[in-house]
């Protein structure tokens, strides 16, 4: 199913440079630590997907091993 | 929900905070926009900037007065601190990394629901920090958040 772009990504970056084209890239957000990263297809970086949160994971060990949504951490119910 | 903006500039360097958004006792800030650039004379100077969560707020520096997007809105509950300060205690893991040539301008916009949220409590917040730089250009930072 095709989704509107904003539902699939966490954000967007734009780099304006004087001697080159403007660069626009999507970022994704980890469901466990809130980290954003630039999506680079084919980069080889190992990321993940949380089946409970139904969202992407950054690939850090602490995010991959246990499901603790960042909402809990923000509210102080779980440590970062 | 009210949205605000704050602006500050600080010379880049090693582990220097440009601008930090500090939570209040009961309100969290949701950062939805960062704009980074430099007003210094154009030069090819690379600076590594990161957005980090802090657990002990900085002291000193400059208290930056926010501007609400809607002039009818009251003052923000969160605080902005910028400039040279006694650095906050940051976590090791960063939330966003920005490697930037001084000539370029960087903008990041979060999509709805994907903002960087601070943790509740006055000691907590999120700062934009230059980790290392090839010089000391002024780094200007605009942060937009809602609460």
Image: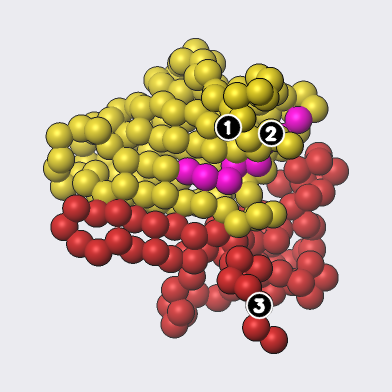
Chain colours: A red, B yellow
Q: Which residue is mark 1?
A: B69
Residues in magenta? Answer: B27-34
Single out the residue that lies furthest toward the right.
A77
Secondary structure mostly seen in magenta is strand
Is residue B19 in sight in this rendering?
yes
Task: Give the residue pinned by disc 3.
Answer: A3
Tell me the subunit letter for badge 2.
Answer: B
- Numbered circles on residues, count: 3
Q: Left or right of B46: which side holds A55? A: right
Q: CA distance from mark 2 to mark 3?
A: 28 Å
Question: Mark 1 or mark 2, which is nearer the start of the sequence?
Answer: 2
Give the position of the C terminus of chain B as an image quadrant.
top right
Tell me, yes or no, whether the two marked residues, 2 and 1, touch with CB atoms within 8 Å. yes
- For label 2, the crowd category at 10 Å Cα-Cα, with few meaning under 14, some 14 to 19 and many 20 or more, is some
Residue B4 x %, y %: 59, 31
In the rendering, which numbered label is found on residue B88? none
Q: Residue at x 20, y 62 (%)?
A: A20
Q: Position of residue B104 (x, y in %)?
A: 26, 49
Q: Write down the residue under mark 2.
A: B2
Identify which residue is drawn at 76% across, 30% down: B27
Q: Position of residue B1 (x, y in %)?
A: 73, 37
């Amino acid at each position: 199913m095709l989704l509107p772009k904003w539902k699939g990504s966490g954000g967007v970056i734009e780099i304006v440079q004087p001697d080159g084209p403007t660069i626009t890239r999507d970022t994704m957000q980890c469901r466990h630590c809130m980290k954003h990263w630039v999506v680079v297809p084919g980069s080889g970086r190992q990321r993940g997907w949380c089946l409970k949160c139904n969202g992407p994971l950054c690939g850090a060990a602490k995010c991959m091993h246990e499901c603790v949504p960042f909402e809990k951490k923000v509210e102080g119910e779980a440590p970062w | 929900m009210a949205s605000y903006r704050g602006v500050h500039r600080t010379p880049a360097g090693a582990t220097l905070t440009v601008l930090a958004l500090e939570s209040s006792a009961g309100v969290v800030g949701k950062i939805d926009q960062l704009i980074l650039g430099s007003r210094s004379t154009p030069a090819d100077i690379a600076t590594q900037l990161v957005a980090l969560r802090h657990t002990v707020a900085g002291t000193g520096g400059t208290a930056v007065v926010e501007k609400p997007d809607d002039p009818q809105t009251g003052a923000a509950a969160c605080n902005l601190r910028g400039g040279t300060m006694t650095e906050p205690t940051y976590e090791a893991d960063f939330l966003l990394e920005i490697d930037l040539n001084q000539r370029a301008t960087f903008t990041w916009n979060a999509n709805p629901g994907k903002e960087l949220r601070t943790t509740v409590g006055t000691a907590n917040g999120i700062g934009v920090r230059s980790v290392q730089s090839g010089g000391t250009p002024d780094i200007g930072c605009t942060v937009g958040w809602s609460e």
